């Protein structure tokens, strides 16, 4: 009988570094209020957003991803050649194939790293961290680059009042590698496809091809449905992530939820009964909702501003279109 050799596992993993890249243009509420017949005051009250960052026409998801990835590599003291796998979480890479990750691997000098994209919308980054944790601890990879990147300004209708005014562009990158101590708790993830129409495209690419008068497909959402789901059904997911990591709410130092809406963030804090000492990411106020990029962008902002520090215990949760979700407790790099 032939005995196969298997990858040798590594006991623990952690996030080694984070890098962030935001769209270069600051877009105020006043800039977008006219087409949706709204106002700065209404947008602030409903969402907490003051500005959002959007990228120019000459930059795409790959450009944003590369910039964020290079910052993460520099912070970790690594080069592309040190990366064994690349996971890009995005819904705005404009090519069905090849993957954004494979092109990025070439740009970074990471060939022949494994490379694949994840389509999990606002939960995409947390999905990627969960997969990277498994790859490292299984021994299948040593260093994994995880990127959440979106150019959502490409898929909005400026006259839409349901979601267009929320969205921004950016990319956040994290490098996951081996550790002497636990740095990433178990990922609690899942989906509820029964609510798949709550955040959706106006129509499919095939429908647009067959009837160009439909116009470019753009995003829409059923705001009340999404607000209720995120505010009340995601807190138990975050609580389960803490329980599976063996961490109590009192031990959480930083909370980094998906930057969907300031009111959702506040409601989740109440549901989780997090202590007032917890530092809460509120990057949505200046950056807007960047879907898969929002968690790493928000974490980077807290670290850069000194509100959070390396070694802090952070609870992160992503949730959105699908509807999908993922949460884990991590040690900040």
Image: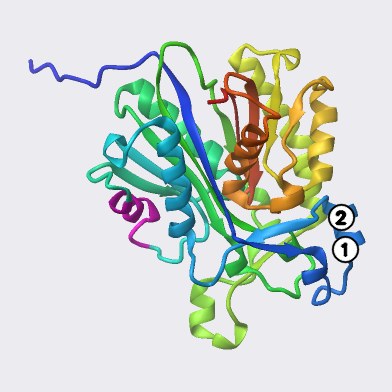
Q: Which residue is mark 1?
A: 40
Q: Residue furthest bottom?
A: 213
Q: Is residue 236 visible?
A: yes
Viewer-nearest residue: 213 or 264: 264
Q: Which residue is mark 2?
A: 44
Q: Position of residue 90 (x, y in %)?
A: 50, 53
Q: Position of residue 204 (x, y in %)?
A: 55, 71
The crowd level at tag 2 (other Cα within 10 Å; few <14, some 14-19, many 20+) is: some
Q: Residue at x 45, y 34 (%)?
A: 75
Q: Position of residue 162 (x, y in %)?
A: 77, 64
Q: Is residue 54 magenta?
A: no
The crowd level at tag 1 (other Cα within 10 Å; few <14, some 14-19, many 20+) is: some
- Quarter of the figure with residue 242: top right
Query: What kind of element bears circle 2?
Result: helix
- Quarter of the figure with residue 256: top right
Which range of residues does the magenta coloring cover?
97-107
What type of secondary structure mainly makes up the magenta span? helix
User: Which quarter shows the N terminus?
Assistant: top left
Q: Residue at x 71, y 44 (%)?
A: 283
User: Image check: 325 left or right of 135?
Assistant: right
Viewer-nearest residue: 333 or 258: 333
Q: Is residue 322 visible?
A: no
Query: What kind of element bears circle 1?
Result: helix
Q: Are marks 2 and 1 in contact (CB under 8 Å)?
A: yes
């Amino acid at each position: 009988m032939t005995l196969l050799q298997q990858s040798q596992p590594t006991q623990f993993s952690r996030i080694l570094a984070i890098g962030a890249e935001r769209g270069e243009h600051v877009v105020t509420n006043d800039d977008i209020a006219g087409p949706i017949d709204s106002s700065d005051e209404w947008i602030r009250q409903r969402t907490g957003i003051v500005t959002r960052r959007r990228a120019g026409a000459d930059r795409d998801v790959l450009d944003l991803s590369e910039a964020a990835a290079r910052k993460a590599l520099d912070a970790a003291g690594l080069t592309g050649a040190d990366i064994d796998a690349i996971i890009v979480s995005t819904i705005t890479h404009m090519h069905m194939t090849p993957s954004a990750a494979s092109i990025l691997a070439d740009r970074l000098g990471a060939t022949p790293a494994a490379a694949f994209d994840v389509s999990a919308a606002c939960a995409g980054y947390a999905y990627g961290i969960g997969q990277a944790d498994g790859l490292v601890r299984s021994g299948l990879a040593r260093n994994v680059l995880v990127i959440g990147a979106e150019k959502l300004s490409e898929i909005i209708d400026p006259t839409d009042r349901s979601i267009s005014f929320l969205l921004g562009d950016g990319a956040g990158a994290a490098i996951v590698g081996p550790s002497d101590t636990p740095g990433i708790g178990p990922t609690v993830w899942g989906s509820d496809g029964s609510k798949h129409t709550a955040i959706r495209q106006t129509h499919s690419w095939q429908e647009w091809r067959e009837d160009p008068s439909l116009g470019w497909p753009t995003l829409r959402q059923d705001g009340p449905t999404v607000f209720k789901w995120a505010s009340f059904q995601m807190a138990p997911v975050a609580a389960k992530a803490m329980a599976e990591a063996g961490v109590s709410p009192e031990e959480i130092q930083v909370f980094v939820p998906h930057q969907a809406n300031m009111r959702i963030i506040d409601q989740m804090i109440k549901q989780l009964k997090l202590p007032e000492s917890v530092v809460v990411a509120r990057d949505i106020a200046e950056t807007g909702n960047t879907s898969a990029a929002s968690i790493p962008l928000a974490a980077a902002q807290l670290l850069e501003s000194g509100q959070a520090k390396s070694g802090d215990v952070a609870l992160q949760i992503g949730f959105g279109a699908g509807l999908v979700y993922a949460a884990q407790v991590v040690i900040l790099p």
